[in-house]
Amino acid sequence: MTRRTALFSRRNWPVLLLAIMALIGGAFAQTPGGAPGPATQPVSIPLSGRSTQNGSVTAAETPVPGTTSSVDTLNPTIQIQGAYRGSTSGFSHRPFSGKLSLREAMQRGLEYNLGAIGFSQALHQAHGQAQVARSALLPNLIGDLAETVQQTNLRALGVRFRSPIPGFTFPTIVGPFNYFDLRARWTQALVDLTAWNNYKSAGETLRANQWSVQDARDLVVMAVGGSYLQVIAAQARVHSARAQLDTANALYQQALQQRQVGVLAQVDVDRSQVQALTQQQRVVSLENDLAKQKIDLARIIGLPPNDQYQISDDVPFSATALPSLEAALRQAFAQRSDLKAAGAQVRAAQRALAAAHAERLPSLSLNSDYGVIGTNPAQSHGTFSVTGTLRFPIWEGGRTEGNVEQAQAALAQRQAEYEDLQLQVESDVRKAYLDLQAAASQVEVAQKNLQVTKETLDLTRQRVDAGVADSVELVQSQEFVATAELDYINSVFAHNLAKLSLARAMGRTAEDLTKSLQVP
């Protein structure tokens, strides 16, 4: 009797408590490793795979009425919208000599333009999402160390003991007592088709973002190249206008001299002066436009937004040997990065739909833990548990059907966008072909027209000197020459811009573009 009474002494309450916990199923022991976790949810992808936050870059050549006749001429423009109009400051990171070549402008644009940077960060985000999706398939190992100090009311827990020893009762308050638990927990999904398809969908989204980055680089090349060509054209207009101003001033001085000797009427002198003043206004207007064009170019390549630099490259007219239209279309369908990105978006949506369907299938996982538990490290003992869980859905309130419907809508939208982009690619190639052919023809006409108008101006000046023509014909001849020079400048710009558009439509790289423009 004494030995039994000593067994239930106050000194042995912690040992009794641990025995009671073992009897009631480990109510106080930390063994969550064997509990089945929640079901894997299918990844939710956006309805549309297109990203419009970064803006766009397009080249346009629209017909406009001529200034001196009813003949329409091409009006080439490069339209840059959204993030592609901006850049980060690259002046402090990359030295600048003050002279900007086309190749350097492209390199700076690819490095500092905000459109390319935005897609690069989206790529990093997609890579992180792919890693998160992959983690559901890989083993997860965590460790924890717990030190517990506890006092328990057994009566409050509903624990009742009847003592076989007359006169002895079990205590209802146990403790305070302490124990520690050092444990490693390992979980592994063995069969989970939802998690597997989520991972594949994230991988396709990552590939789509990789292609989108390449497409953004192509757009940056197009934006920088088009802006550079636009500056060249604006600079040529200024040079032409200054030459016309010099000619107009010379004719005005000649008219003054003829007036002083009495061989020319004052009205002819006035006409010559008006023509000189008109040309001076044109120079001011074109110089202002050139400065703005240079500021816009600096803005998209990370230079300080001013016009205090020089353009070192000139891109004259050069005939281009074009591939056949069918070959160009085949190359475009094979190389366009935006089309490849749209295809990857379709595959990502297909995987997301498969993940939603897989919610109806069973999944198998394995959970285990191993650790030591005791009142102190010296009195601890190893414990472990291994649990295999087969989870099979029975009824989840229509959640699976809702996920499937959402995934089907996203897939249908992505497929429609892919088909639309295929048609857009073909449209881009065909339009670029038409623009290039029209611009080449316009360059040829503009060259002949410029030559004829210059000859006409020389003959008219000779006639005025001989007194058989008045200043009206001379002013008109000057205007014809100015218009012909502007038409030639516009036609060369339109031809080079059409080359740029065709390179973009066919999915060429920056190196191919500089080769087609014959830039060193």
Image (spheres, grey):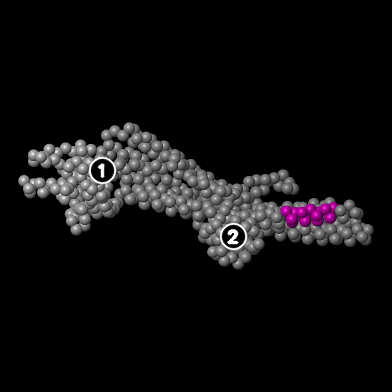
In front: label 1 or label 2: 1
Packing grade of label 1 (10 A; few <14, some 14-19, many >=20) is: some
- Identify which residue, 89 or 33, lies in the foreground: 33
* In magenta stretch: residue 440: no
Circle 2 packing at 10 Å, graded few (<14), some (14-19), many (20+), is: many
Residue reaching furthest left?
1
Circles 1 and 2, Cβ within 8 Å, touching? The answer is no
Would you identify the image quadrant in which residue 398 lies?
A: top left
Image position, residue 488 (x, y; %): 68, 55
Query: Where in the figure is residue 322, as x and y percent of width and height?
Result: 54, 54
**Magenta-drawn stretch, dominant element (helix, strand or loop):** helix
User: Image point 85% across, 57% down: which residue?
Assistant: 464
Q: Name the residue under label 1.
A: 36
The residue under label 2 is 303
Quadrant holding the C terminus: bottom right
282 part of magenta stretch: yes
The magenta segment is 271-285
Q: In the drawing, what numbered circle is on residue 80?
A: none
> x, y (%) of residue 48?
46, 42
Left or right, 10 with respect to 89, comes to left
Q: Which residue is pictured at 37% across the width and 37% down the height?
A: 403
Residue 418: give x, y in percent of width and height: 45, 43
Seen from the viewer's position, the closer of residues 263 and 168 is: 168
Q: Earlier in the sequence, mark 1 or mark 2?
A: 1
